[in-house]
Structures are given as C-alpha cells and as structure tokens.
Image (cartoon, coloured by chain):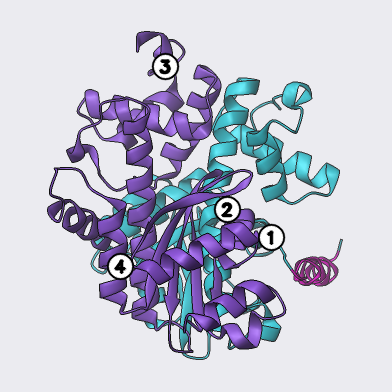
Chain colours: A cyan, B purple
Amino acid sequence: MAREQRLAQVFVELADTLVDEFDVVDFLQTLTERCVELVDTDAAGLMLDDQRGALQVVAYTDESARLLELFELQRAEGPCLDCFATGRVIANIDLTTAADRWPVFTEAARDLGFATCHALPLRLRRQVIGALNFFSVGSKPLSDDHLAVAQGLADIATIGLLHERAARDQVILSEQLQTALHTRILIEQAKGVLSARVGTSVEAAFRLMRTHARRTGKTITVVAEGIVEGSIDVSRFQPAPERPR
Amino acid sequence: MAPIRVTEILSAVLDESTDGHASPAALVQMCARTLRVGGVGLALMTDEGPAGTVAASDSTALQLEELQFSLGEGPCVDASRTGRPVLQPDLARTGQARWPAFAAGADAAGLVAVFAFPLRVGAIRIGVLDLYRSTVGVLTERELADALSFADAATTLLLHLQARAAGWGVPEDSLVVLDDRAEVHQATGIVSVQSGVSLQEALLLLRARAYTEQRPIGALAVDVLKGVADFRDDLDRE
C-alpha cells in the first residue's frame, strides 16, 4: 500500500477510537505501534504526567523502549524528560555525540543498540502532558516528512487524552490520565497471569493479548480484565513462536 | 521517581499513632487538614461495589459516606464500580441529574463539590477516598497532586491493614510505598496463578516474602519472571 494511503488509514483508525468512554491505554498502545510502522524508527514509548510531579511510562512497543524510559525517570536525565520539561521537540539526537548532554542515558541507550533518538511533546497550548519517544538502531536522521508524521501522531495522542470536545476541561484530563495509569497496571498483571497459564514469557503473553483483542474486536483493557477475572478461556491461547529479532 | 510525598504522608500517619499502628482515621484527618477540604471519607470496596466506611474526618463526611451506601448512588459508588476517578467540582450543576438523592443530601450538609478517587492497583480494587468541599471549583494542580498522593498512601495503608487482618504478622516498618514497576505487577499475576490466589493476595505474598528475605520487591519480582523464585508451595509454608 502507498504510504499516503496507509497514513490516511492510520489517522482514521485512531480518530475512530475517540468515542465516548474510549480505552485510553489501548489507544496509546496502538498509537506507539503505528509510530514504529510509519516513522523510520525501531522502538517507541509514551510517557504521561502522573499529576503527582512525575512521569509514568504508559505505552511502549519494545521492552528496550520501556527500560530506557524507566532509566531516564530513575536517573532524572535524558531527552524525553527535557522534552517534557521544555515542551520542545528534541529530534535527531546522535547518541555517539550526546554523552556530554546526557552521559548516563546515552550510555544506556547505546548499550541497548540504539544510535539515534527523538522526543516529541504531547502538548496543548502551554500545557505539556507527556512525551512520545523514538529510539532507532540506525544513525540516519528523520526526514522532515517523517518528523511531521511523528508530531501529527503526538498531537493525536494529546487530542485523545483531552477528548477534544472537553479540551479545556481539567476534570476530564485528570480522569483520563489517572485511569490510564491504573489500566497500565491491570495490563501488566494480566500479562503475568497469562504467561503463567500458557507457559510463556510476559512479552509473548502481551502479543497473544493483542492478537486476541484484534481478532475479537475488544480493547486491550477488556481482554486484560477477562484474563484476570478468568472469563476469557486462555486454554486455547497457543504461544506463538518467538519473533525473530 | 520515588514518590517522596507518599512516603512522607505514611510516616506522618505512623507518627500520629498512639498504639504503634498506622490508622486510617489519622490519614483522613491529615488529608482534610492538608487540602483544607470540608471532609474526607475512606471506604472499602469489593468487586461487587462499596463495602463500608473505614474512616471519616468528621460526622458530616461519615454521614455522606453512609448516605451513598444506603442509596446505592453517588460519586464514591461510581468510582468504586468503574475504577475511574469521579471529580465533581460543582455538584449542583453536574451531579443533580446523575445522583439526585445524594446531591440533595450533600447540599443539605453544605458540601457542594466532591472528588472521589478509586484506590486500585490495576485489577485489585481496594477502596475509595472521597474529598468533600464547601466551595465550588476544581482542585488546583497542587491540590490534585496532594489528593492523589493521599490516595496512594491510603492504598498502601489498606493493603497493609488487610495483610495484618489476614494474620500475616506484618510489622509497621513494612508499611512502604508500593513499588510501581511493571515487573512487580507482572510477577503479581504469575504468583496468583502459581499459588491459586487472588491478585490482591498474590501482591501481599510478594510483599511478605520480600520483607522476610530483606530484599527489594522489584528484585524478587524479576526472579519470579525468570522462574528463579517460585510461589507454588508458598501457602503450605504458612
């Protein structure tokens, strides 16, 4: 499929989920996956303001992205944090020369095999509510076209969280953010339950959950709830062969 | 990333104790004082809905908590049922159609705004913290951060009290903030399957073992994920 066509399709897919009572984490998870598909990068992660003075990782495509974001939060250093603090795009960071700016983060990112990273703010006017982060193995900078798509996706995430029609409504934003944080935990618990039941890694368990959600048209949250409640029969879930890396 | 505020709240609650045990009553009092709200209530909840008041900062807050249980309606009931916060900065404007009987009761008590925070750890639903205010308006950013920190502290305290009620002999110095890493929640899911217990009991088992082995729960969780630590026989040991 032509790139323009696929782009349009993804934006429609994401806009389509922005209905009442939509599932924030399912939406953000899909969004990070589409980022990796549409932007020339290898891993994506999304952090949100927890409204207690810190950020929390809420969606990620790869364990390496989650680890790096967690590392930034723990060491209080890195491009994603700077992006969140300033509300500015931090793109095309060459990790071979970034050690002066972020020594700890740069070393950790390079140890995980990344050469380039980018951070885009989720912002609405003056308020920054999170950051979308990309990590790439190659050292090629993002083209302007890809950067524009990345910012478009970050804006869609912001709109989703603010629920568009209630853009100025702090109440809705708080309810959404707090629900997203609780939902993220629920999904991690469900990954553990499923991995123990099926006998697979938690990463593979998550892929099974995503596949089941897509196949049945349910959100990832509904699937996670079904797994922890035992209302979804997981005996037929077959562990897929580990994805070649 | 350590939630300093929550740690401060928990140790302040423990400091106020006269019998060496942290009490929910002290927590709601401190929450009401810090946020300067009219009243604070703390209720238990189960999967079936609200399950009774644990503490209230004064008789009015207690009355409003009890009113919600007897009516089966109100922000606390909704927060408990959906697991989402219910923030009502102007109850007269937005609450009357949703909870007519409760809104009337709150109005009669002079409380015009309610903020209900579910106390959850993912699928584990423990309670609800309700803040009642006599003035209309949203919580400021600072107030919201404080309210959420009190909610986190209340979650930790209720989990702790339930472990003690289950006769696990947990000491007060194990009243530490929940480690919020993904590994801990994943391990909770694994332990619940291994031991055949609920997620809540699984989390308590993890915390208890981390405490007895004197190691961080995050490190124990990683061992559970690797299959190095196992909880299959854990309940037999008790």
Give the magenta part as a residue range: A2-20
Q: CA distance from mark 1 to mark 2?
A: 9 Å
- x%, y% of residue B225? 45, 27
| Chain to which mark 4 belongs | B
Q: Which residue shows up at 39% across the image and 84% down it? A: B140
| Chain to which mark 2 belongs | A
Q: Which residue lies under the disc numbered 2?
A: A183
Q: Which residue lies under the disc numbered 4?
A: B31
Q: Secondary structure at mark 1?
A: loop
Q: Is residue B221 above or below residue B86?
A: above
- Classify the position of the C terminus of chain A by image quarter: top right
Q: Amino acid at mark 4?
A: Cys
Badge count: 4
Which numbered mark, 4 or 2, is in the foreground of this view? 4
Q: Which residue lies under the disc numbered 1?
A: A23
Q: Amino acid at mark 2?
A: Thr
User: Upstream in the sequence, badge 3 or badge 4?
Assistant: 4
User: Upstream in the sequence, badge 1 or badge 2?
Assistant: 1
Q: CA distance from mark 1 to mark 4?
A: 31 Å
Label pair 3/1, CB-CB below 8 angstroms = no
Which numbered mark, 3 or 4, is in the foreground of this view? 4
